[in-house]
Structure formats: structure tokens, C-alpha cells
Image (cartoon, coloured by chain):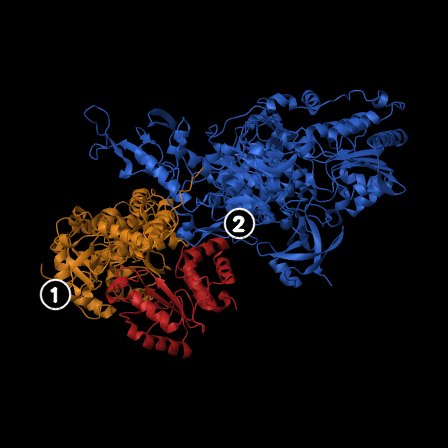
Amino acid sequence: MSLREKHGAEIDAIVGKYAQKRSAVLALLYIAQDEYGYLTDAGVREVAEILEMPPTDVFEVAGFYSLLYEQPVGKWVLQVCDDVPCCFSGAEELITALEDTLGIKVDQTTADGMFTLQRVKCLADCNRAPLMQANLEYYRDLTPDRIDGVLDELRTRAASGEKLSISGRFAER
Amino acid sequence: MPDVTLIIDGQTVTVPAGTNIVDAARSTEVSIPVFCYHPKLRPVGMCRMCLVEVWTPRIDPATRQPVLGEDGKPVLALMMGKLQPGCVPPVSDGMVVKTVTDKVQFAQKGQLEFLLSSHPLDCPVCDKGGECPLQNLTMQFGPSTSRFDYADKVHFEKPIALGDTIYLDRERCILCSRCVRFQDDIAGDPVLGFDNRGRAWEIISKSDPPFDSKFSGNTTDICPVGALTSADFRFKSRVWEVRSVPTICTHCPVGCNLTFDMRHNQLMRVMPRENDYVNEIWNCDKGRFGMRFAESGDRLTTPLIRRNGKLVEASWEEALQLVGERLAELRDDAGSQALAGLAAPDLSNEDLFLFGKLLHDTLGSPNLDHRVGVAGEAAIDDLPAAYGVGQGTNLLELGKGTAVLVFGADPEEEAPLYLLRLRGILARGGDVTVVNPYATKLEHAATRSLRVRPGAEQALALALLKVVIDEALDTTFAERLRDTDQLRRILGEYTLAQLAEAAGVAEEQIQAGARAFAQAEHGIIIYGRHALAGGNDLSNTLANLALLCGKVGRANSGLIALTSGGNTRGAIDMGVRPRGGLSAAEYWPAASAGTLRGMYIAGLDPARQSAAAAAALGNLEFLVVQDIFLTATAELAHVVLPTATLFERDGTFTNAERRVQRSRQARPASAGQPAPWEIFQRVAQAIPVAVPAGNSNGSDRAAGWGYVVASDVADEISRKVAGYSSAGYTSLGVTRQSWGRQANDDVYYDGTSYINTEGVGVQISSRADDPKASFSLSRVAYPGAAAGEGIALLPVVRAYDGGDWARGSKLQPRMVPAHVVLSHADAARIGIGVGETVRIETVAGSASLPAQIDTGLAEGVALLPLVAGIAAGDLLTGAVTAARIERAE
Amino acid sequence: MPPLTEHIVLRDLDVPNIGDQEVYIQNGGYEALRIALKEKTPADVMTMVKDAGLRGRGGAGFPAGVKWGFLPKGVYPRYLLCNCDESEPGTFNNHQIVDRNPHQLIEGIILAAYAIECHTAFIYVRGEFAHAARTLQRAVDQAYEKGFLGKDILGSGFELDIIVHRGAGAYICGEETALMESLEGKIGQPRLKPPFPAVAGLYGKPTIINNVETLTNVPMIVRKGVEWYRTFGTERSPGTKVFSLSGHVNRPGNYEVPFGTPLRELIEADYYGGGMRNGNQVKIVVPGGASAAWLTAAQLDVTMDYEALAAAGTMLGSGGVIVLDETVSAVEVAYKMDEFFKHESCGKCTPCREGTHFLVKVLHRLNHGGGRQGDIPILHDVYNQMAGNCFCLLGESAVVPIRSALKLFPHEFEEAIARATAGANGANGKHAIALVTH
């Protein structure tokens, strides 16, 4: 099913908000990557067609913004801030611990397709360092001893059939 | 605009307001280095190469007057307290610009070191080497060493194909966005963009097919490094090894000025040559990449003579003697009326003039044409000779105050550079109204688009006229016009509502278009294949519109007809048109009936386009075909004569705006094939002196046939052909400096397009240019609605038509396959999907073709692209053909 | 200076659950809107904001009311953009406002829109703030329900729509023209100025763009008056500022303080930072986000206002105060900060794109035991080539950390090089090949 068939009402509502259709491009790319797991070539072209934009312009956008994924990612995208001041407040230890626990390096995805681990820049919650976002939900004061519990919780949520959104569209706890 | 005076490096400079600092400096002797800035593109201030010190008088906020220092001179302040990119801020009075201070030089060195920090420095194997702004500027302004380790450079897979014609070397790219801006703003094909960001930024093209633009080659010219190179020129030659020959493109009526870069008589590349009047510094890909046909191994090299039903090689003497004798025999036997000639509208004026002389004067035939005589072809249009855009027309200077009406034309396909030029007029504030029965690329940019119902074009043209007359929008020409009352009476018989209804266009749209055209200072009507195929009534109506609005007889106003050949205007002027005899369309029944018995065809291939024509040709007693390749028509000939191509001959061509331009010989023909005009002369000389009673023409063998070089023919043209007296080779060679070009600086400013040192040509006058001329308005009529049954099938021109010009071209994958385009509604009704085959039936014949679907097309309209594999003559009846289209069983 | 007993912006600290619309209304919420629509003309509101001396909290500190006055007369439509692309390292005050006190921001937007006669406003929320964007959207929806938004607001005839727009991860979109490009569905790269946004901004129309904290101040100014507002802060920096305190203090967090509060108090007072962790010493203080020049322990007596910080050679910036102790290496801090700028460099201009790459390359090796002789002059040259020559402030900001580090802690760079060259006897890396650019 195409994006329009599946999300027609949502797309129309978003596009309808703007004086120019192409303002909706980020929102539609968010929908596309949730739908297809990442921004497939075809998915980007679908968005271009819906918004009547040159495909190249949409690929530009998809390539520019860090929360748009043009490569496959896991069900949960784990993004650890490694910026100042987090990096001086335990971020590096957190990243190492996550790598060890998940058995992957940064920018890799676990074999079961559950987790992708990334380093990101300031997440604007610096007083709660170290911290990460899982599909853009915050996990604050995340000391390495809490990792197992958090990962278990995320796995449980994925197994529960909860609709997950790597774009952070409807995660709400 | 008022002038502004400023000081640049101590020199006082006066330039028009709005000029930027780089261009102002350029008008004196100061060179400010640039990469991203290009005078044809909007400034973006990205590369930071042009940073300079800009000092402006300090203004007292209270008095708004300049603050004066103790010396009584204005106190200057450094703009924004830092260096400014010279490409951005416009000049202002009292400004002082410094381009050679320590600070500026430090910045220039810095930018170059930064740019080179990721550059591979592979100049020895780079096509751009020798004409590379990065090389030049590094030599002039850069540091001598880099402190950046080679291992630190960014490495990419070496060149990737960006499309069929262009390669991208991401290591060399300095991310200046010139190519992106060219595609977005100039070409209007936004097919290039940037992926990622920061240091990972790279050019991408995600159109389908990639780099889907007819102007892609231009990006390689303006690329300031060797990032974009053409598939056609890659690794062919160093640029300093080539000999540059000025030529004229004959692929369409624009007449782009080209340079053929030759090495050892082989074409290395085709480049645009600057001519503000014609192509600025651009050309289209068909002109750039579609010139490899001349190197084809399939070219005819020797004459062929039919013996025992087969074409066999023969000597020139033998072939010419046979042609001369047989033509004379037929003339003597059956009379001159039994002979006919066709010559292609992309031959030179010299060729066409002598063809006319041979057929008409020597052989006495009135039967001449430059068309192939199939339905749906353009009518012969004389109007531009009378009302063509006036002398001195220069579209580059037009913008605000100019209105252009583009009627029944698809400039992108028929004459690609006009798309760029019209977009330029729009960008400069001009008004463009498009009238067409189907969507064209131009209309996306146009001020308004009037989607006329096919077959009702005349109704729409009359509606425009009616608005102008009823609202008395322009009277400047009133005294010079006759028959206004008659026209008023005719138009009085219809209401605007009736005409608008018939045309299928809203009245307000028609009024807006008519008012914009009438009220503009300059008005141009461009009409193309679709309009011309509708016959002369429509073009006469358009001429009436121009006359009534006073838009003729002066520079930048008048008509431009987009004819099918590169030199149709010349063919008409040289008399290759029916001279009281038959037209091409009348040849075929006449030949089938046996009244036409001999024919001379130069450069045209009617047999490919019509089975009826092929059959008629087969019925001729004697057929001479002169061509480059063994065409379908040539295969039917009794004698085939091989001829030189554009590369191998001198000659002049007349473009759509009646600009006569000269093309030079780039090399001798490899097998000694003569220029067409030379062959015509040799045929004339081979005609025996037989003197039939009452025929004075043939009495003196070869009299008046003593041309040695092309200019001998041109001299005679300037004496004998109206309007051409000013177009001798000497006047054609006069050049004109354009927009601040500075010798030796053009490469790093403007790209590799060649400066025009060989002349910009001469625009010959139209009859309306005579200020005393008065004009008759044509009697035009409203034909009533063309109520055809079924679907309206329209022939449409495709630039990439798979013609012989495309042989050996890198554009081969882009040739449009034979197909028919259906509207979404019709396809749904018929039950046809994309790529499925439909059966088309018309009164002229039938064909089975794969279908494409265009959601923008109106229901009941189908398009038939005129490409290889389509025999238009077997399917069409005119500009609009009623067709039955069904699913093929 | 004692801590505030009543907050202007972080009112969630005074009133629990003020993010709840009912609670907000019970505590004076939307009162300013009623006052403005009933009793004041748009010009009155603009004058109040001007007179209050409200300065833009996004970094530049430009007076908001003056900025509003730049709109060309009689040109409509106009747009109001609320910049909630908070991404400056060490800054999280906007985050708290939209999470906990969204209605005050919305009321501020409505008041500002009324003042500038605009009927469509956008809140551009950074993509990572998925939760905050939902909070804002919910608050906007509630405001529509109560008639604070939409057509004929509170029967005044004034009309306003607010659109919550999520970005997708790009620090540069906090730059006002890049934000507009992004809102228009393009890659977020800054535009040439002029034209300035007030003349030609979003969709080419006159546009005002203000920071979240700036707009959140407006309802209190309108409700409580200019005089009241000016009782906070200094003459030239009136009001309060929310500082985001992070790093090696005992009590990191957002603290709203009157302008003019000493930095030392912010770090050391029990009611603010509570002093350094483990009793360590202050080594580096970055007072206004990563783009602000560093201060050292010797400069803690500077007061936190635009003028005093400028006089100290730095800036108030985003209000992100990062305090680092002696356990950090200045080389590493500069490296991490410039890595941020390199990561966020949009690619548009040469000095930023190439310069940040260049800096990080050298800083990376210095920080990882691989420095070379000559690296220090290279760093100096590179940032000097960038300074003043970049297209926008991102590149200029990238200059700040390395310049601060080299100025304040040059010996740490020398030591890094000495360690590297001594340790590996010069075999630690290839020597730079001087490439002759023929």
C-alpha cells in the first residue's frame, strides 16, 4: 500500500496546514521512514510525488537532516549524546557499556534488528547527563548499571506489539 | 538606472547602480577571484573567494549625512567590520574597495588552501586542465604549498555517471553550486542537488532518468574545476591541443553559435560560442552531443548508381554525367513540369540558392520544396519576412515591459535555447503567455497558460484579436493599417464568450493575455510546429494581432516562427519553395499518376515518413538522392550522391530571427565528399546543351556556374535575394563585446564557452522595418469547431527523435521510442496501462504503438511524438487528426 | 542577590502543574491576552515590550520590540516564527519552558502576533524534541478550544493560527534564515542578508522570529506592566534570564536569575549550582553555550548580563553555562566542541566546511597522542582564516573554542605535541607532504 493509501488523512491534514505544500516534507519523510523502516528510494520518491517536488530536492532534504535515515535502522534507534558537557559526565562510559551489552559498535544495528546505536550531539537535557534517546524518548541519568533494565524494557515494548516510531511520531509514555 | 561612482584599488570607476563589486572591478583592470559567482547566475556568496575590504562613508544617524573628517573628506568605515564577498553587495556612491591588502590576500590564500585541502590535484589527467579556474587562481592568488596531508584528503570513488552525458568527480568538486543554480534557475530543470551536509556534501541527481535535462552540457562549461566532465569529451584531448573552428548548429532554428574543437581533423568536442543575440553562452545537449554523426562509419563515400536493380559504386564523373543526362532527357521529353526537387531546410543558404538555381533556372522546374509532403507538416510561412522581429532584436535585453505570446509551440523540444531565453525574460520581469493544447515545460514558468482545445486554436487567436479591437488597446499603428474595419466586422459576428467557449479557455484568461501583450512596450509572438501545421490562417491571425498592437517594425517586437529545420528561413528566402508549381504534398499523387517523372532530393527522407511517398518515389523514372547516409529514400534512388556535412564545408544559415550567421569548415571530408552546393554546380555543368524549342534556360550549358568557393555564391545571394544585401561574409564577421567580458578572464569568470571572435552575424531587416510601410490586415475567418470523431491525435516534435543526427551520440539512450501518449481518462476508458500496446486508426491509416499515460493531458487528446519508427504520413491528416484508439488485440 | 521568589519564565517552579491549561488560567494565564485585546492596540503592546527593554534571549540580545518595528508598513501577510530549535551544546532552558509551561509561551506568541498584526505563527521545534512538540501541540489544541486561537479570538476580531513544526536534526536551523529555509521544505542553510527576514522572510513575506524564552516573557510584561518588569535585572538588561547550568557543579539545572547575578553565585550558591563536585576547582566556564568564549576561575566575579560578559570578552549567548573542573583537558574540550561544529556545518561556505574539518583533524590527533610539530601555528592560521570570513555565525562560532583553548591553555597543546613526538621518536605519523600546487 502506498503512503497515500495508508496515511491519506494524516498526510492531507499535515499538507493542509501550510501555504506551500513542500513545507510538509519533513513530516512526510517521518511518516515514510516509519512505514518502511527507513527512507527507501521508493519512499522518498513517493513523498516527492505527493508534494509535487522534484525528487532531487526531497533526496537533498533526506540527506541533510540527521533524524532522517537513508540506511536501514533497528526498531529502536539509541542515540547517546557525546557532546560537551555529557562527554565529561559519563557519556563515553555509557557508549562503551552499550556497545559491550549489545555486541555492536556505534553506527551498527544488532543482528536481530532491534537496536541501532548512534552518537549524537547535544540533546538539550545536559543537567541529566549521561543521557540518550530511544526513538526520541529520553532516558536520563543513564548510568551503565541501568542499561540492562532499559534495554529489557525496550525489547518488551517491541514484543508487545506496540507501534514503534523511529521518527518519534507517537511514542508517549 | 543611475550610475554609481566608487573607487576600486585607487581607480575611480563608474558603473550602473545594482552592479556588484566583482563586476564593477571587472569593468576596470582589477580582477577579484571568484568560484561560485558567475555573471549569469544569482550570487550566493558561498565560496568566499571574492572577499575584499569594502569601505563606505560613515553616516551620521541624526543628519543622515556622511561624517566628515578633519581633512573634510568623508570618514570611511569597514562594512560590517570584516571582509565582504565582492559578489554580493551592490556598489554605492563613495564606496572604496580594496582588493590587495594583507587581510584580503591572507583570506584568498586561506580559501584556496581550504579548497585544495580536499582536492586531488590530479590535473595531469583532468579534462579541465588548461582551462581550469582553480588552477589559474591557485597560480595567481594561492599558497605554494599545502599543510594538509594527502592522507587527510577526502577520497571518493572516482567519477560516477551523473546521467548519460555527464560524469561527476566528487574529489574535485569544490561545492560552488554553479551547476545546481544553472539547472534550477537558467534551465528550469531542478535535477541537481546536494546530498548530506558539511564536508560530506556531494552533488546528486535523482530525476528519472538521472540528470534529465536538455542543457546538461552547460554545467561542464561553468564548473570551475574538473568535477563535471562530459562523457563525450572525457580523456579525448588536452584543451591546448585543439584547433577551434567556429560553426553554427543546424539542428533547430535557433542557430546556436558553436565551436568545433578539432584535433588531427577529428572532432574532440563541441562547445557553445558566445552570441548574446542567439545563445548567450549556452547550447543544448543536442547541439553539443549530437554532432558525432559526421564520424559515422556508415557514411556514404562514393556515388552509387542503380544497375540491374542494385545500387553499386560508381565514379563521380559517371554519376554526374548520368544525372545530367537523365534530368535533361526528362526535361526535354516530358517538360520541366515533370521534374521536382526537395532540399533539406538544414542546408546552407549557398546550397539552397544553387539548388533553386539548378531546379528552377537551369531545369526550368517550378516544383521545389523543403518539406517532405506528409500531413501534419508545417505550412510555408512567409510572415516573418514581413513582420519578423525587427532589426536589433536582442532577447537578452528584454524583461520588464516585454510580453511574449507563445502559441502552439513547445520551445524545449522544437528550439531548446528559446526555453532558456524565455525563462530569462520571465526572470527579468517579462510576461509570457503560453497557448497550447498540451502541457510544455515552458508553461511551468510562464505568467499564464491557456490550454486551448485542439482544433480551436484559430478561435483563441481571434478571441485575443477581439479583446484588442474591442478594448482599443493599442492605436499606435492605426494610420499604417488598412482593412481594420473589415476585420472589426468579421470579429463583430462573434462574442468573446462564443470564441472563448469554442477555445475551451476562460474569458478572463484570454483578456489577461491580450492585455498583457497589447500593453507591453515590446511584444513578440513565437509560434511553432503545432500552429504552423494548422495552416496559414492561424499565422495570419497572429500577424494581425501583432499589427493591431503595433508590435512589428521595431527591435524586440514581431513574429518568430519556430520552423522545423535549422535553415527553413533560408530555404524560403532562397526560393526552395513551390514557385507556381507543386508543393511536396502534391508530389506524391503526381508521381504516382506519372505526371512527375524525375526528382532530385537533397538531404530529405520522405520514404521513411510515408508509405505513399515511398510508393510514389518508386514510380519515378529517375530519382537522384544526395545525402550523408543511405536513407530509405536513397535506397529507392537511381543515383545516390554522397555529400559533405556541416563539418566539411563553409556556409551561412538564417535563423528564426532572420539572423544570417556563418559556419566554417572544420576539416576536409574524409572521402572527398563535396559540399552540397558544389554537387549542384557539377550537376548543372553536366547537363548537356540540348536546346528544346521555346526553352531559353538550357540554351547555354553551364552558363553562370563558375563558383569556386562558398563566398562566390554568397556574393550572388547578397545581390539577388531581397534583404541579404547586408549579409555578406565581411559584415557577418563583425563581433560585439558583451556583458563585461574581459580578455583572458573569461575562463575563470564565465566558464569555458568560447568568446565570439568570428562575428555575431547580421539580422536582415523585415519589410515592416521600413518606417513608411503600411500593412493590410489579413482577412481571417473563424472556421467553426472542428468536430472530429474520436480522439484528437496531435503530432508533437521531440528533440531526441532518433534521427540520423544521433548516430554515435552519447544521447542515444535518451532517444524517444515510438509511442503514443494518452490522457489518464482515455487510458482508463480503453483499459490500457503504461507500456501496453494500442491500435490507432485514422482515415489515413493505422498503427500499433505502446502507450504512455500523461495525467496532465485533457481527455480526448492524444500525442504522437514524431520520432524514428513513426511514419507520420501513414497516420495523420493534419495538425489534428481524428483517431480511434483501442486496445491492441 | 537572593534567588527569585517569583519567576517570570520558569513559573512551573512557583505553580505546580502550570502546564495544565486550567492551572495556568487560574494563575493569571491568558489574562494578558484579555487585557491586550480589550484595552490595547497592537502598537500599545509593541511599545510595552520596547519599554520593558525585553532583549532577545536566543543569543544576540537584540531588543525584541525594536525588531518588531522593522516590519515594513502595510505589507501582509506577515509571519511570526518561534525559534524552538534549541541545540546549542549546554543549553536546555527552552526545553523546560515548552515541557512545563507551554501555555505561557503560546500566550506570548499570541500577544506578539497581535502586536505585529500577523495571523499565522509557527513554532519550529527541533526534531529531537518529539515529546515537547506533542506537549506544545496539545497546548495549542486546548488554546483553540478555549477561543484563544483561531478566528475572532475572545470576540476581538483578531485571528491567529499556530502551527507546530518539527525539524529533523540540524543545529544550523537555529539560524533564523536557515530555519525559514527548513520551514519551506528545503535543506536548512542560511540565506544571504539582506533582505532581512523582517522584509522578506518565510515564503518571501515579512517575518519576525523570536526565541522561546523571549516570547514567554511577553505575557508577564503585558499583565504586570513595564515598571514591574524593570524591577528585575539591570538598566540595560532588564528582566531575568534562565541559565542552564551543567557540567561539574553539584546541582546542574535551569536557574532563572535577574540579569546581573554574579557568575560565582550561580556556580557556588546553595540555591543554584551548589559548588563544584568533589570540591574540585573550576577550570573552564563556558557562559553562553559552545559558541561563547571561555572564562577561567579568575573571572568568576563577572556578572551575568549582556554588557558585563561582552566586556569580559565573551557573551551571554544562549545562557548555557558549562562549568568544567580541572579533570578535563583543554585540548579535549576544544576538540569535542569543534567536533560539534564540524558535525553541524551545513557545507555551504568554504571556510566553515573545510575549516571545521581541518581543525578537528588536527585537534583529533592532538587529543589522541598524535600531535605534530607545527600543529599550533596551523591551528592559529586555520581559525584566523575562518574568523570573519564565514557565511554565517556557525563558522564564526567554531573559531571560539579553539581560540579560547590556545589563548588560555597553550601549554596543554605544547605538552600534547611534546608527548607525541617524544613518545614515538617522530614515527607517530607521516610528516605532512608539502604538496606543490603547480
- Chain identifier, colour orange: C
Which amino acid lies under the numbered mark 2 shown in the image of this protein?
Pro
Which amino acid lies under the numbered mark 1 shown in the image of this protein?
Asp
Whether residue B466 is visible: no
Eyeballing the image, is B538 above or below C11? above
Tell me the quarter of the image containing the C terminus of chain B. Answer: bottom right
Instruction: Write down the quadrant of residue B325 in the picture.
Output: top right
Residue B865: x %, y % from top left: 66, 49
- Tell me which chain the residue with mark 1 is part of: C
| Side (left or right) of B680 relative to A51 | right
- Chain identifier, colour red: A
User: Which labelled disc corresponds to residue B159?
Assistant: 2
Instruction: Write down the quadrant of residue B146 in the picture.
Output: top left
- Tell me which chain the residue with mark 2 is part of: B
Q: Residues within 10 Å of mark 2 (few under 14, many from 20)?
A: some
Residue B842: x %, y % from top left: 74, 53
Number of labelled discs?
2
- Chain identifier, colour blue: B
Q: Are dots 2 and 1 in contact, CB under 8 Å?
A: no
Q: Residues within 10 Å of mark 1 (few under 14, many from 20)?
A: few
Residue C67: x %, y % from top left: 25, 47
Q: Which residue is mark 1?
A: C270
Q: Nearer the viewer, mark 2 or mark 1?
A: 2
